């Protein structure tokens, strides 16, 4: 057996071991999944008199009671031990920091997998090495963050055990059949990540490279399943299932996991994590770009920032639609929860959320406009940017306009009702949907311009294609804006349905226009090369703004999601009887979110600094610059 054959065999065995490690928690969970069933009597028959059944609060099915009722807590040191500080704020901080780092380390390996795959399939060897180096840079960033995530997870569990022992004990008893699965899968993910990282150089060519890429797929499967399990805890707290009205577990762990909000939470969190991870990596690239001393370094980190931004925005664009789905499911589960979110106590927070979403898209567009400056031939689009700014500003102002305002009883009396005499005529949902869809459509248009910035289409039908694309975008704007205006003249129950054609129009622009533009630009003539690194410092500040705004919005949405339970630990099952079972003011919540954002970015800068201490000079051939220009990604525009 030759050396190469032995190497292949060892790689296959290593991959098989990792797959076995992935399946091990599922195999070990089988006894636990059946542990809720009552053991048969000595004569082989169950004693029916001892079997107690309950009715599932969500699925309305009957099941055998296999757990204790939810504890009825009282305000005291037994159920709510405390330091000389508000316990909820301490838990808020620990939870938010763990969520930030967890989201980051779940997203970056997916980016790494995508970029490494692009390097494997490209036929350009120099380009393949650049992609491989970029993927390595991505995973290197996340390695230190992964260790810190584990530390923060330990701190979070300690905080739960110390400050909320009764609640944590109840939640652990409900999820007991899958708690060890989570722990073992975390071990499997850790082992896969370290082998994947440290085996990079050993498996960099040929068949071994495909084995290495397969390990990244396994790594991301494990990470995604871990996120799904964590989301099941959130979903259970908001919309419990698998228990009866007393909170007693009924023996079906799938019902506990698969609550009314589990699927929309999973989709929303996947998209949110990816957009957030892309923003953080783009901010890292911007930080390195601004600190670079040579043109070669600036070119590399300019390219890295662009790739991270493009991947992040690709997941940011569908994120509002996933949010609509989540809110729709909240309304379907409990209408009162939806009213509390969108039209009651928490409604003003959604105006802040709209502000942050607007900042995200404005920062993205500004970066794309600045990035066109590195392309010769893109000057033809510069004179149209002012019109895009006007469209974005109008859509943004409509999107953030509230329908109702939070007011004191005295203000309500002075105004003569809930509706403001001027503002009450605006801020309806069809108009807000119109505003955000106009913003997204404009962002798609900016991307299309960027993709053809230094190219001239050579297809025979290019003139017709350009006219068709222009007309398509024009009528898309007319349709979205027309439906938004029409919403003012119809009842609210009919107005809600207008979101479907508005979203369909935006998605048509997103998918159809990108596809058509790619076909038109195939084999296009280049006016000039992309001069990577020749971009203004303002563009890098836009990337940092993009990442910071998304970090703030993640903290805000986490607060909204938790606050909708009001004074319940588990909605309508286990009441929160601590002294802090109330909703904070908007000002306090904003200050707390800002503190979390500040702490995260200070700590992540420390992680970046540690990474720079351990940075190894990349192989010369991996980062060699193209004469007269900087390396450019294949097929990126």
Image (spheres, rainbow, N blue to C red):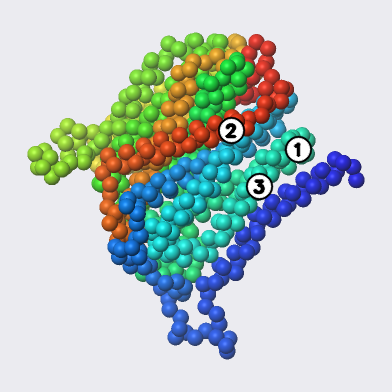
The answer to whether residue 620 is seen in the rendering is yes
Of residues 55 and 493, the one drawn nearer to the viewer in this rendering:
55
Q: Secondary structure under badge 1?
A: loop
Residue depicted at 61% across the width and 35% down the height: 140
Of residues 534 and 479, the one drawn nearer to the viewer in this rendering:
534
Mark 3 — residue?
192
Q: CA distance from mark 1 to mark 2?
A: 21 Å
Mark 2 — residue?
611
Q: CA distance from mark 3 to mark 1?
A: 15 Å
Mark 1 — residue?
202
Of residues 608 and 519, the one drawn nearer to the viewer in this rendering:
608
Q: Quadrant of residue 320?
A: top left
Question: Callout 3: few (<14), some (14-19), or many (20+) C-alpha neighbours within 10 Å?
Answer: many
On the rendered structure, is 517 left or right of 218? left
Examine the rendered structure and indicate whether residue 289 appears above or below residue 232: above
Q: Which of the two labelled residues, at mark 2 and mark 3, occupies the earlier sequence position?
A: 3
């Amino acid at each position: 057996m030759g050396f190469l054959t032995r190497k292949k065999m060892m790689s296959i065995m290593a991959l098989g071991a990792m797959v076995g490690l992935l399946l091990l928690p599922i195999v070990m969970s089988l006894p636990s999944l059946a542990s809720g069933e009552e053991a048969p009597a000595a004569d082989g028959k169950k004693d029916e008199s001892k079997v107690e059944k309950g009715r599932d609060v969500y699925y309305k099915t009957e099941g055998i009671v296999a757990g204790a009722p939810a504890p009825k807590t009282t305000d005291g040191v037994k159920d709510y031990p405390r330091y000389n500080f508000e316990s909820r704020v301490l838990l808020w901080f620990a939870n938010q920091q763990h969520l930030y780092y967890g989201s980051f380390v779940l997203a970056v390996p997916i980016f790494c997998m995508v970029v490494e795959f692009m390097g494997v399939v490209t036929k350009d060897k120099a380009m393949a090495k650049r992609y491989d180096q970029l993927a390595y840079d991505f995973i290197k960033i996340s390695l230190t963050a992964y260790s810190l995530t584990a530390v923060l997870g330990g701190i979070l569990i300690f905080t739960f055990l110390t400050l909320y022992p009764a609640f944590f004990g109840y939640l652990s008893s409900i999820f007991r059949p899958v708690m060890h699965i989570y722990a073992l899968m975390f071990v499997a993910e850790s082992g896969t990540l370290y082998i994947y990282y440290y085996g990079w150089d050993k498996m960099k060519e040929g068949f071994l490279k495909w084995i290495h890429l397969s390990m990244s797929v396994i790594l991301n499967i494990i990470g995604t399943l871990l996120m799904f399990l964590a989301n099941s805890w959130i979903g259970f707290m908001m919309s419990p299932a698998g228990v009866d009205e007393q909170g007693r577990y009924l023996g079906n762990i799938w019902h506990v996991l698969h609550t009314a909000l589990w699927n929309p939470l999973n989709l929303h969190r996947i998209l949110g994590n990816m957009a957030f991870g892309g923003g953080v990596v783009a901010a890292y690239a911007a930080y390195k770009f601004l600190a670079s001393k040579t043109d070669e370094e600036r070119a590399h980190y300019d390219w890295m920032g662009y790739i991270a931004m493009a991947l992040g925005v690709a997941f940011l664009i569908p994120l509002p639609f996933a949010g609509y789905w989540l809110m729709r499911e909240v309304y379907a589960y409990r209408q009162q929860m939806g009213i509390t979110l969108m039209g009651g106590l928490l409604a003003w927070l959604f105006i802040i959320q709209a502000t942050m979403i607007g900042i995200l898209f404005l920062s993205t567009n500004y970066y794309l406009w600045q990035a066109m400056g590195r392309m010769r031939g893109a000057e033809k689009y510069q004179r149209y940017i002012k019109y895009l700014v006007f469209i974005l500003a109008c859509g943004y102002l409509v999107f953030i306009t509230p329908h109702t305002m939070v007011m004191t009883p005295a203000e309500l009396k002075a105004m003569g009702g809930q509706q403001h005499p001027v503002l009450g005529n605006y801020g309806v949902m069809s108009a807000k949907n119109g505003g955000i869809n106009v913003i997204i459509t404009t962002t798609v248009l900016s991307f299309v311009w960027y993709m053809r910035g230094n190219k001239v289409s050579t297809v025979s039908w290019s003139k017709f294609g350009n006219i068709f694309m222009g007309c398509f975008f024009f009528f898309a704007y007319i349709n979205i804006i027309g439906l938004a205006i029409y919403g003012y003249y119809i009842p609210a129950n009919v107005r809600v349905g207008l979101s479907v054609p508005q979203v369909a129009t935006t998605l048509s622009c997103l998918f159809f226009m990108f596809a058509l533009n790619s076909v038109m630009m195939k084999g296009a003539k280049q006016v000039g090369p992309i001069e990577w690194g020749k971009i203004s410092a303002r563009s890098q500040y836009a990337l940092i703004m993009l990442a910071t705004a998304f970090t703030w919005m993640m903290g805000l949405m986490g607060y909204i999601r938790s606050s909708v339970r009001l004074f319940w630990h588990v909605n309508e099952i286990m009441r929160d009887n601590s002294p802090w079972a109330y909703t904070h003011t908007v000002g306090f919540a904003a200050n707390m979110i800002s503190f979390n954002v500040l702490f995260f970015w200070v700590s992540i800068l420390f992680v970046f600094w540690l990474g720079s201490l351990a940075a190894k000079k990349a192989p010369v051939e991996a980062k060699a610059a193209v004469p007269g220009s900087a390396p450019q990604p294949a097929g990126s525009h």
